[in-house]
Image (cartoon, helix red, strand yellow):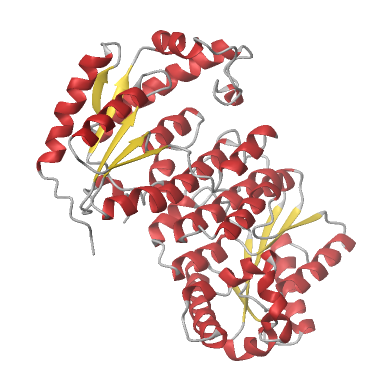
């Protein structure tokens, strides 16, 4: 099995995922795609990163007490992902639905690498994940992203700003460095796994047109036939 | 020189100044590991060694997650294996490595081999396990307390384990998983238990060869097993008397 996500899955449903740093507008794009797919009469299932409650409480507890290390942080997120995969991603895929995921395993690859976790190790850890049928990366320069995030936000949270890594004591500066490194990792990931890069500085509407065009290719061979 | 199984380095963890020893006692349920360990701990302390004992799924912040997860009944094989891994990583970084750096002897009541056995039985990919646990420290010695299922039965199947109260407590829910009851390997507790333990033992036997465990016959009397364990530990520590 090693890395299952390197090969196409055989479920009747289709998995479409979006990646990108906070403030890249990926969630907006995914919502718009969802609306469009629903208007076409498709059964759509939406899921986002870190939304299952299995280890949420543990992660929160660990963050509060500053007990998380890069390694446990990574494993707990993988646990959360495994739980979500089994409860929220695989069942709708087996049912022949279109599953839209806001962030996927590439988020972990990027974040964990910046926290110093071994590249190969984290890629093996997620070996049980399945390959998306379509993956987008919304690329935005750090400055733009920081501006977007800081609007309406009085301060950055400790882990969000990557302050646990020790780049800087200043949250904004730490965040800038952290996000910059995440962007570099994403670039590597895009070429490694062939994510479709969308220029996220373009207008929302023009980005969405590109997204829908690409989604059409997935719908071409899509037969919503549940496994029974 | 202490090293990890896959030579992976943990972020922000330096292994170069480890002076302690990591000694693992492995074995299936009911072989008497804990009793031996507490005796050995005392024995070593009398000899002037600082000793710390680490168990399995005992880390304060993840152990709770396992408990919560069990209550929600949402665990599947992968999430369970990953929670084990998280717990292990937490104990390794916060308990085992700091103690070894401080020159302690760490007695591990079970180690990654237990996790391997439990996950392998449930169909988890072997390669995935080896890679995921790649950051684990290679122990200085592993003593495997081996027992035959036949000898094990009377030790485990007593009223305390089969009574009504047993299944009501969350703590015991853990044992439910650990005794393989989730796998429904037979029509009742007994069948399932026998099947499960046989499988666990056979996996341990093959790991014993692969990783060079010191195999100790745990069906023998306490004092006999104890003597063998102590002799083995003396050798690890380079004690002559």
Across and down, in percent, residue A10 comes to 21, 54
In the rendered image, the vertical position of residue B148 relative to residue B4, given as above or below: below
Left or right: where does residue B16 sit relative to residue B50? left
Quarter assignment of residue A193 = top left
Across and down, in percent, residue B190 comes to 56, 87
**Residue drawn at point x = 63 percent, y = 49 percent:** B62
Across and down, in percent, residue A170 comes to 61, 11
Left or right: where does residue A186 sit relative to residue A171? left
In the rendered image, the vertical position of residue B110 relative to residue B224, given as above or below: above
In the rendered image, the vertical position of residue B88 relative to residue B117, given as above or below: above
Outermost residue, right direction?
A: B46
Left or right: where does residue A176 sit relative to residue A130? right
Question: From the image, which quarter does the N terminus of chain A lie in?
Answer: bottom left
Quarter assignment of residue A27 = top left
In the rendered image, the vertical position of residue B233 relative to residue A46, given as above or below: below
Across and down, in percent, residue B94 comes to 69, 44
| Count of all numbered marks drawn on residues in the image | 0
Left or right: where does residue A12 sit relative to residue B98? left
Question: From the image, which quarter does the C terminus of chain A lie in?
Answer: bottom left
**Residue drawn at point x = 61 percent, y = 43 percent:** A58
Closer to us: A7 or B130: A7
**Residue drawn at point x = 41 percent, y = 52 percent:** A87
């Amino acid at each position: 099995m090693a890395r299952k996500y390197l090969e196409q899955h055989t479920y009747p449903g289709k998995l479409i995922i979006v990646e990108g740093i906070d403030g890249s507008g990926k969630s907006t794009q995914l919502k718009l795609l969802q609306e469009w797919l629903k208007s076409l009469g498709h059964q759509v299932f939406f899921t986002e990163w870190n939304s299952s409650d299995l280890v949420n409480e543990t992660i929160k507890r660990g963050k509060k007490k500053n007990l998380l290390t890069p390694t446990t942080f990574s494993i707990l997120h993988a646990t959360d992902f495994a739980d979500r995969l089994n409860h929220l991603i695989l069942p709708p895929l087996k049912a022949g639905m279109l599953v839209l995921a806001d962030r996927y395993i590439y988020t972990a690859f990027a974040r964990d690498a910046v926290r110093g976790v071994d590249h190969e190790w984290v890629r093996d850890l997620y070996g049980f994940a399945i390959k998306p049928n379509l993956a987008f990366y919304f690329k935005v320069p750090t400055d733009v992203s920081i501006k977007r995030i800081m609007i309406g936000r009085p301060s950055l949270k400790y882990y969000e700003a990557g302050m646990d890594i020790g780049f800087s004591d200043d949250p904004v500066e730490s965040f800038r460095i952290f996000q910059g490194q995440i962007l570099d990792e994403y670039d590597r990931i895009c070429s490694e796994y062939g994510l479709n890069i969308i220029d996220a500085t373009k207008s929302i509407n023009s980005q969405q047109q590109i997204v829908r065009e690409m989604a059409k290719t997935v719908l071409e061979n899509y037969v919503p036939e549940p496994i029974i | 020189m202490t090293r990890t199984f896959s030579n992976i380095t943990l972020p922000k963890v330096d292994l170069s100044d480890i002076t302690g020893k990591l000694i693992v006692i492995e074995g299936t349920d009911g072989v008497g590991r804990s009793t031996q360990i507490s005796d050995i701990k005392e024995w070593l302390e009398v000899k002037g060694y600082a000793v710390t004992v680490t168990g399995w799924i005992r880390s304060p912040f993840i152990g709770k997650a396992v408990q919560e997860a069990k209550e929600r009944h949402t665990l599947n094989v992968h999430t369970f294996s990953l929670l084990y891994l998280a717990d292990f990583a937490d104990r390794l970084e916060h308990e085992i490595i700091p103690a070894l750096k401080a020159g302690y002897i760490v007695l591990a009541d079970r180690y990654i081999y237990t996790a391997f056995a439990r996950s392998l039985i449930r169909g988890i990919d072997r390669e995935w396990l080896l890679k995921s646990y790649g950051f684990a420290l290679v122990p200085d010695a592993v003593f495997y307390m081996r027992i035959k299922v036949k000898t094990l039965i009377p030790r485990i199947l007593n009223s305390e384990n089969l009574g009504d109260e047993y299944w009501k407590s969350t703590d015991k829910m853990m044992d439910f998983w650990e005794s393989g009851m989730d796998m429904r390997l037979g029509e009742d507790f007994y069948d399932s238990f026998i099947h499960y333990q046989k499988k666990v033992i056979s996996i341990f036997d093959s790991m014993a060869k692969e990783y060079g465990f010191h195999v100790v016959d745990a069906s023998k009397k306490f004092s006999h097993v104890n003597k063998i364990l102590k002799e083995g530990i003396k050798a690890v520590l380079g004690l002559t008397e």
